[in-house]
Amino acid sequence: MRLPRPFGPRNDRLRAFFALTALCGLSALPLQASELRLEFVPTQMSSWQNFMIVNRLAESVFDDVSLKLEIKVPKAEDIAKLSQERQEELKAHLAIHGRFSGRYRRFCAIESLAPMALPWEQAAMLAGIETADIESALKGEQAKEMLNGASVAANRHLPENERRSYLIEAASTPKPAVEVIVINAAKYAGWAKIEPWGLEALKRLPFEISVKELDASTGEGLSFLKEIGFPLAPVVVLRPLDQEAQSALKSYAGQGALEAKGKNKDLFLARSFSSSGVLWAKKESSKKDLQLFIMSQCPYGVEAQRAILEAQNKGQWPQDAPVVFRFIVNRQADAGKKPSFASLHGASELEEDIRQMVLQKFEPEKFPCYLAKRLPNIDSSLWNESLQDCGVDPAGFQKLFKEKAGGLLEEDFQLSQEHAIRSSPTFLWRGRYVTVGLDGLKHFEEFKNLDLKSLGSGGKAAGKCQ
């Protein structure tokens, strides 16, 4: 849905706005306190439509008015009718709203690209929210208390005759036109494609949608991939076909939900669809080399390292598939200054990244011993005990740490940027195939019988974003 007429004089804008106030179940007139409040039910498509309207109003019409989302839940009997997946999503919204209220609107703006279809974990990641921090709140009594304490939706609407008239007028108004370009890589790898549910979700965007599907192996597909300059396929790109669509997509990009690409920045990449795929410009290596990109204190990265060590110790890991650990870091390079690096979970994680880099590069025979001792308490300050227990010379190690850190960090930073990798854990197989998560390795013959989830679950949880 959208406003029934273009925004015109101030009076027209106010009239349309107050009609929306009743339609969307706003709990109070917004202009009294420079605050626009929206009652929002994450499991109802009508609520998502309302959010998209009001979010746009707050951005483009009443830019001096803040938008406050008041999250509501259905009645208990209606929640019970929801699928388990929808119930989990509802709890995730409550947890994010409660713990990261300042980022909740951005989270919803990202999710609104494909309401109730885009996994909440991906939207949270793009909004800068630690998913593990939320997952811990979705289990047991804590989750029940969260649901029981939530406000139940009032479901206030316009009177039926007014609502019917409004919807008829809105339905007759042309929507902004967008072409969704989907470039799969199924001819390179059967799994490297956008699934049907993803396309269906895109068709629910508030635009007049047309879909064009290409394959990365064709001339047209390759030409388009070069134009947007993105290394992975599959990709989903939104091309605006009119000025209104251009403005709307630019707004999404400003919120971090899309990335502007192309020479004129008029193509918009939906990055969340492209965490796994094929590096279309690369050739498959003849060697069975595997690189694992992680953050050293991310619990999922720790789980991946633990799974690999366990598989190696049990003789289940392919002998001809050596693994190299890479570390996902950020870099800031000011003109005339030496580049500085940072890691998502803080300085202690960056230091742990460097320790593992140095050991892996210069004392590889002691690296497995260090990991075995260090992973159970990865965020403790007693790393020196693990080094000493594995026979590492403290003075020599500190010298290497100081001298080699910059070069090792730069190398891993460049690799993650080149391959569009930013999730922990992410695997790069044979220099061409990128997969996120432990289950991703099952795409490949050498690993299809390995249950890495089970192998990595032993021991207590470790990492800073639980």
Image (cartoon, grey):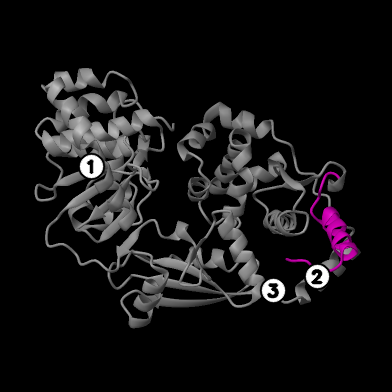
Instruction: State the image coordinates of residue 175 (x, y, percent, origin top left).
Output: 69, 73
- The amino acid on which the numbered mark 1 sits, given as a three-letter code, is Leu
- The amino acid on which the numbered mark 3 sits, given as a three-letter code, is Lys
Which quadrant of the view contains residue 186?
A: bottom left
**Residue 211 colored in magenta in the image:** no
Using the numbered discs, state the Cα–Cα distance from disc 3 to disc 1 in whole angstroms.
50 Å
Q: Residues within 10 Å of mark 1 (few under 14, many from 20)?
A: some
Q: Residues within 10 Å of mark 3 (few under 14, many from 20)?
A: some
Instruction: State the image coordinates of residue 130 (x, y, percent, origin top left).
Output: 48, 39
Q: Residues within 10 Å of mark 2 (few under 14, many from 20)?
A: some
Mark identifier at residue 408: 1
Residue at 64% x, 67% y is 247
Q: Tell me whether the residue at label 2 lies in contact with that at label 1, contact meaning CB atoms closer than 8 angstroms.
A: no
Which quadrant of the view contains residue 152?
A: top right
Q: Is residue 156 visible?
A: yes
Q: What residue did someone put label 3 on?
A: 175
Q: Specify the segment rendered in magenta.
A: 1-28
Q: Is residue 157 visible?
A: no
Q: What residue did someone put label 2 on?
A: 4
Residue at 90% x, 58% y is 159
Q: Closer to the camera: disc 3 or disc 1?
A: 1
Q: Secondary structure at mark 3?
A: loop
Which quadrant of the view contains residue 179?
A: bottom right
Residue at 27% x, 28% y is 375
Mark 2 or mark 1, earlier in chain: 2
Q: Secondary structure at mark 2?
A: loop
**Residue 17 colored in magenta in the image:** yes
